[in-house]
Image: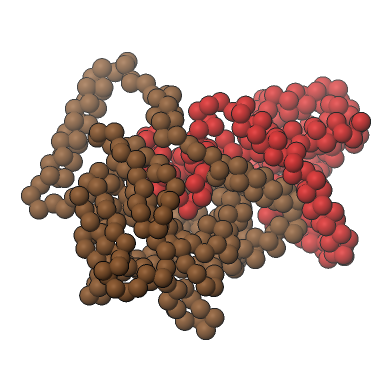
Amino acid sequence: MSARKRQNVSRRLDKGAPHRQTGADLTSDDRNVTHESLERLLSALDENRERAGERYVLLRRKLVAFFDWRGASSPEDCADRTFDIAARRIGEGEVVKNLPAYCVGIARMVLLEAYREQERERSALGAMAAIASLRGADNDERRLQAIDQCLDALPAENRELILAYYGNEGASNISTRKQLAARLGIPLNALRIRACRIRAGLEESVRAMIGNSAGTERKE
Amino acid sequence: MRLSTEKERLRLRQYLLGQLAETDQTHVEDAYFADDESFEDIEAAEAELTDAYVRGQLSEQDKLAFERGLNGSARLRERVAFARQFAAKIDGMEIPADTLPDIKRRTPFAWPTWRPVLVTALVMAGLIVVAGVGWWATRPGSAPAATDAKDVQRPAPPPTIGTPTTTPPPPGTGVAIAFVLAPGLTRSLDQAATLTIPPTATEIRIRLDYEGDAYPTYRAVIRTPEGRDVWSQSELIPARPGAKSVSIAFPAATLPAGDLVLTLSAIGPRNAMEDVADYAFRVVRR
């Protein structure tokens, strides 16, 4: 969990303010979860507030991924709705020993609800997808520059690893990957996970940079 | 619990493509919600799937399934955009072989100095294993085994048809040899290209260019002129959709000296295997 996200979770709890507002202290991830809901969920996750915050962020990431992989059109909203339902039930007295497992059950019901909603909005969803792809084209130049900068900013060891792992036609070059794993003295799967972590960090940095530059342009 | 077998990785891929039955989907989901390592595995699987998509390495069926998901996911579209530009950028970069030793040197490794007895035992065990492997490799009648290259020399891009490219390796290291074969060579073995393989070669890479229609996947078979199979591989995918070349790689010890014929085939419109191109070449070992 990044320091920024940890700070945001703590700041929201300390201020005791509801979340349904924009503001510098809110991340886009948590804008729809109320303060009270967040408190209940964090308590159910861990007694230690810092650890609870980390587990909350990871659980939210899993829920967003679940809804996305299952084809929900608004995975983030569905994740927030799941958390709200779980928090409300905990507030009503339900004892939850395993919050992630509890959230999965709720998420599946939220997913069915989302499917029904998407059936009704199918034509509107098509228009939104077309707009999103146009926006993607505008971002290409910014993304390319961001990739360059973020690659340069990586520690040399990490940069060399992902270039060696993903270069040269990627996954079809399995022999190079095996050789790389042998040279590092780690199993191939460990190399795979290490490379994926570095790549995920790179993607996040690029996304943040594009988002920041887009925000700057909007202000201008 | 880390999912590391090929079968499990395939299962995650099928999950991401929406190809699993409902009960199997549930099992995958229960696993990654319960176990953070499982979630990391599936995130890694998604990155690899995205990479394969932008490189045109998915089968037609998987590509269609992936694009169905793409239509409904802004997050995945963003990942694809990143993957496309990332692949384009790094594919064009030369990665010097001598950077790889730097990664190894910086990998943290510390001897357990607080247990001298354990350290001694580990060293002795290691020496016994090394001696055993050495005996096994040199026992009478053992065939030369291909070993993993300690330091792969990246060959220069092949300049001409049938001409091998290689860089002289430093002593004691292995080397990958790359060739390019073009179609249109006759079955007359007198006109065949010659692949000269040095004793230090540990891997052979061949790029097969061809003409005519493009197919999603290919099968390559290397045979002696008498028809004995030497090597084969299916599910070969061109590097880019519509590209008229595929690459193959195998241990250098695979090819016997002498004349060989490589046949490239694919499943044609009538759902039957059709020959795409033949390549005749001669292997000479120095």
Answer with the quarter of the image where residue B62 lies: bottom right
Is the residue B190 above or below the residue A192 in the image?
A: below
Q: Residue A39 at what x, y percent from top left?
A: 78, 31
User: Residue placed at 40% from the left, 48% from the top?
Assistant: A175
User: Residue placed at 70% from the left, 30% from the top?
Assistant: A53
Q: Residue A147 at what x, y percent from top left?
A: 66, 36
**Which sits in the foreground, B174 or B18?**
B174
Residue reaching furthest bottom?
A: B270
Is the residue A146 above or below the residue B161 in the image?
A: above
Image side of residue B6 versus residue A4, left or right:
left
**Which sits in the foreground, B140 or B158?**
B158
Image side of residue B124 versus residue B248, left or right:
left
User: What is the letter of the brown chain?
Assistant: B
**Which sits in the foreground, B254 or B154?**
B154
User: Residue placed at 74% from the left, 41% from the top?
Assistant: A141
User: What is the letter of the red chain?
Assistant: A
User: Residue placed at 24% from the left, 66% from the top?
Assistant: B259
**Which sits in the foreground, B35 or B179?**
B179
